[in-house]
Image (cartoon, rainbow, N blue to C red):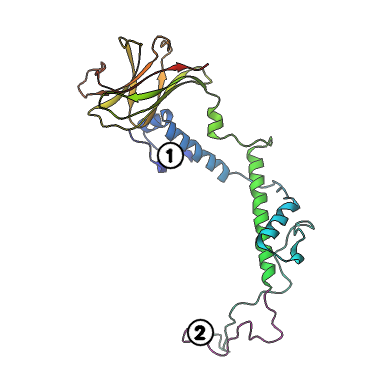
Amino acid sequence: MEHVDPDLLSLMALGEPVGTATEAGHVAGCVTCSETLRGFQHAVRIATLDLSGIELEEPGSQNWTAIHDALGLPSALAADPLASGPLSLRTDHPATPLVTPHIRPDGDEAPLKNGNQTAAAKTPEEAGPGTRRARPWTWIAVAAAGMVLGSAAGWTAAGVLAPTGAPAPSSTQTASSDVVLAQTSLTALSTHTGSGEAQVKQLPDGTRQLMIRLANDHVDGFRGVWVGSTDLTRMVSLGVLDNESGVFALPDGIDLAQYPVVDISDQPYNGDPAHSDDSIARGTLNPEK
């Protein structure tokens, strides 16, 4: 079957009772779909994390120095705004709006003329001496400080997800606990063009899996996955490769020394479970040392 729709995987990550048994089985055996689901679940954990009561880590002064230099701020703003306590976004005087509309006694705004305010409306430049103009450097400093606080929040999230100080394990790091037993390249045979690779992994629980990656190739039937003896007189079917990749359980009784050949065949829809003798690609597993 095709890969499970990402929208459905996102609902699964939220714990919704969605999907059929076939789709759930596909996700369990498909590397691509299971990795996508784990990524969604990781995002859900972060999004639902309760940060109340968590103290933000205060960034060092070197961060403000880097921001100061990058923005080209004046020397008057060289001091770290967080050094003397939390930053307040309040200013001594309210900023003057860009346009001050004229309000008539009845409370209605003066009408617009040719898209502009009437002469009664004053811009900051026209305002009287009692009006203070906004100080642009103040807002630049506030914006830069926001960047610092954003960085601190990011550092805190990383610390919460990995309380021991080590980065939170990614899906790749989790998979590293698997042991690669053998692998091989899959070479196209006959008139076929599909090529790829095969790898046998032993999971922490002791079970083994055969992971197949094979480029799509035109076939008349379906693609069967086999392991066989060196002379191909003994073949064991492991399942059907629906997409460009698939994961297949290796039975405990299969000795890779006796069945080192990985074979992908073009199987006709004739109800015959035997190998069709039309191999798409093949390779011999090389044990890892």
Q: Main secondary structure of the magenta part?
A: loop
- Mark 1 residue element: helix
Q: Say above or below: 79 vs 51.
A: below
Q: Which mark is residue 9?
A: 1
Q: Amino acid at mark 2?
A: Asn
The answer to whether one can see residue 92 in this image is yes
The answer to whether one can see residue 211 in this image is no
* Residue 143 picture location, percent across and down: 65, 62
Q: Amino acid at mark 1?
A: Leu
Image-based side of 262 in relation to 100, left or right: left
Q: Say above or below: 25 vs 230.
A: below
- Mark 2 residue element: strand
The mark that comes first in sequence, 2 or 1, is: 1
User: Residue 95 appears in which quarter of the rendering?
Assistant: bottom right
Query: What residue is drawn where x is 35% and y is 11%?
Result: 230
* Residue 121 picture location, percent across and down: 58, 86
Foreground disc of the pair 2, 1: 2
> Along the line of sight, which residue is nearer the eye, 101 or 250?
250
Q: Say above or below: 188 vs 94.
A: above
Q: Residues within 10 Å of mark 1 (few under 14, many from 20)?
A: many
Q: CA distance from mark 2 to mark 1?
A: 53 Å
* Residue 233 picture location, percent across and down: 30, 9
* Residue 257 picture location, percent across and down: 43, 10
Q: Residues within 10 Å of mark 2 (few under 14, many from 20)?
A: few
User: Residue 136 appears in which quarter of the rendering?
Assistant: bottom right
Q: Say above or below: 91 vs 252.
A: below
Write down the region rendered in magenta: 108-134
> Along the line of sight, which residue is nearer the eye, 243 or 161?
243
* Residue designated by label 2: 116
Quadrant location of the N terminus in the rendered image: top left
Q: Is residue 169 magenta?
A: no
